[in-house]
Image (tube, helix red, strand yellow):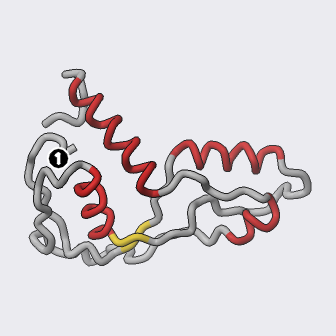
Amino acid sequence: SRAVQGQPLKMTHGTQTREFNYVEDLADGFVSLAVAPGIDGDLFNLGCGREVSMRDIAVTILKLMGDPITPEFGTLPERPIEIYRMYADVVKTHERVGWTSTISLEDGLQRTIDWYRDALASGSSPFAS
């Protein structure tokens, strides 16, 4: 929302990684697990299995938006309790349930950017500051 509004984007160096999943993929995964036979009581991870640094995600989002602002990497201090890697091992889910995510990171980000733009343009968005 800061980029949509042309506001500065201050970040850490952005070396920590996360996995980003589009909500439709996760909803589809929950349904697939709910109807899969023979998995009662077992644990499964849903996700795309792709680890992306926060720096790369910021650069990708801004690129998809036409680079409206320049991110300020390293201007915020690293958090001492930061979790540096967070992503799902989806092998078991794919092998036992046959589910895999289908919406690419870039497509999901574009859909999310469009949603934020629409929400901010409506004039009643909680994201406007």
Q: Is residue 117 above or below residue 87?
A: above
Q: Is residue 24 above or below residue 67?
A: above
Quarter-wise, where is residue 77 in the image? bottom left
Task: Point out the residue furthest to the right here.
Answer: 38
Does dot 1 land on a helix, a strand or a loop?
loop
Q: Viewed as shown, does residue 74 lie left or right of 108?
A: left
Tell me the residue at 56%/68% (across/down).
Answer: 49
Residue 25: x and y, percent?
59, 48
Residue 102: x and y, percent?
60, 53
Residue 71: x and y, percent?
14, 62
Tell me the residue at 62%/43% (across/down).
Answer: 27
Residue 110: x and y, percent?
37, 46
Where is the N terminus found, in terms of image quarters? top left
Tell me the residue at 26%/61% (across/down).
Answer: 58
Tell me the residue at 65%/63% (across/down).
Answer: 45
How many neighbours does mark 1 have within 10 angstroms: few (below 14), some (14-19), or many (20 or more)?
A: few
- Which residue is at the front of the view, 86 or 120? 120
Q: Is residue 117 above or below residue 68?
A: above
Label 1, on which residue?
2
Marks counted in the figure total 1
Quarter-wise, where is residue 96 in the image? bottom right
Amino acid at dot 1: Arg
Where is the C terminus found, in terms of image quarters? top left
Q: Viewed as shown, does residue 122 lie left or right of 73?
A: right
- Which residue is at the front of the view, 109 or 14? 109
Task: Point out the residue furthest to the front here.
Answer: 66
Q: Viewed as shown, does residue 34 lie left or right of 73?
A: right
